[in-house]
Image (cartoon, grey):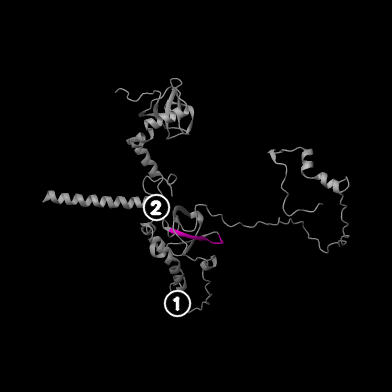
Amino acid sequence: MPFKRYVEIGRVALVNYGKDYGKLVVIVDVVDQNRALVDAPDMVRSQMNFKRLTLTDIKIDINRVPKKKTLIDAMEKADVKNKWESSSWGRKLIVQKRRASLNDFDRFKLMLAKIKRAGIVRQELAKLKKETAA
Amino acid sequence: MAAKRKTPVKTRNPDLIRGVGKYSRSKMYHKRGLWAIKAKNGGVFPRHDPKSKAPAAAEKAPKFYPADDVKKPLPNKRKPKPTKLRASITPGTVLILLAGRFMGKRVVFLKQLTSGLLLVTGPFKINGVPLRRVNQSYVIATSTKVDISGVNVEKFVDKYFAKEVQKKKKKGEGEFFEAEKEDKKKLPEDKKEDQKAVDGSLIKSIEGVPDLKAYLAARFSLKSGMKPHELVF
């Protein structure tokens, strides 16, 4: 099984531990075997251990340690936000967040909707069963 | 003693750090206008001689000395404060009752009474909870709000909910067994009328929101996988 996602300058990663949990960051330089210099449009550039990062499929085209403005422009050009939000990983995270923020009333409405959907599915299934039985 | 001011004077010397003021003694002398007071008084600070007090009446020796020196308890000047209402509880909030006969029911909050208890109603037609008092600690406040503007809750006070005092019956020997058989306490008609009056406009605003009626009719319960500390109410 060869590796497909490499640590390189411009690799977009997800922070999975610490203060910036859940943020998308760009690897902007490699400090040593264990650490990278990491940057995002809304945070101060800082070093992070690779153990805190999970690499994604997205890569942008930047030079080593670009200026903040250059970084932001490159991210816009590569359309990182939309690529992430349309990827299945990104969509999963959005759904998780939405589920966690549901109100008690929202959860109730969700339950009603689930029951309704299951009812419709069961009706269709019953119809199909009748057809094949006949 | 100098005369006390009704409001304390705001200091003209802001603190840089606790204990260190921004301005020096000489600057403060100038700021407070002590030079003007001196000038008005001919170069010296005005002196106020102490007012001569009327001679106090001579105290007589008391007639009675108690046998033991008993310590008097310190006077308790504490005034109980009204219970602080949680910021999440506003009139019209849907609350989840956590204890008692109506455990798990979702009810509408009306107002906080002077005793600190919360006045709450089902509405009765929807979930069977009447106008009732409930303690804030046994309640979860959800973020769902109901429009409560059409409801008049002025007349409901703690006294409205006080138990009726039973008149003492003299137990004669023969009537001993019959007197115990009291008929079931019926709810007085005016309380029923009050309930209907409050619930009337409430139910209208509840029916305006889809699914809210069914929501209030259902009970809350924790299902598998629900972590209360992670749930958003």
Which element carries disc 2, helix, strand or loop? Answer: helix
Whether A14 is among the magenta residues is no
Res. A86 image quadrant: top left
The residue under the point 42% across, 26% down is A27
Whole-percent x, y for residue A88 in the image: 32, 36
Name which residue type carries label 2: Phe
Q: Is residue B17 visible?
A: no
Q: Chain of mark 1?
A: B
Whether B108 is among the magenta residues is yes
Q: Is residue B136 visible?
A: yes
For the record, the magenta segment spans B107-115
Which element carries disc 1, helix, strand or loop? Answer: helix
The residue under the point 45% across, 69% down is B197
Q: Nearer the viewer, residue B166 or B160?
A: B160
Q: Mark 1 — residue?
A: B178
Q: Is residue B65 above or below residue B164?
A: above
The residue under the point 40% across, 47% down is A102
Q: Is residue A101 above or below residue A34?
A: below
Q: CA distance from mark 1 to mark 2?
A: 52 Å
Q: What label does residue A105 carry, if any?
A: 2
User: In the rendered structure, are the residues bearing label 1 and label 2 in contact, judged by CB atoms less than 8 Å apart?
Assistant: no
Whole-percent x, y for residue B108 in the image: 45, 59
Whole-percent x, y for residue A77 in the image: 38, 30
Name which residue type carries label 1: Glu
Res. B96 image quadrant: bottom left
Of circles 1 and 2, the one toward us is 2
Q: Chain of mark 2?
A: A
Q: Nearer the viewer, residue A27 or B156?
A: A27
| Crowdedness near tag 1: few (<14), some (14–19) or many (≥20) residues, C-alpha within 10 Å | few
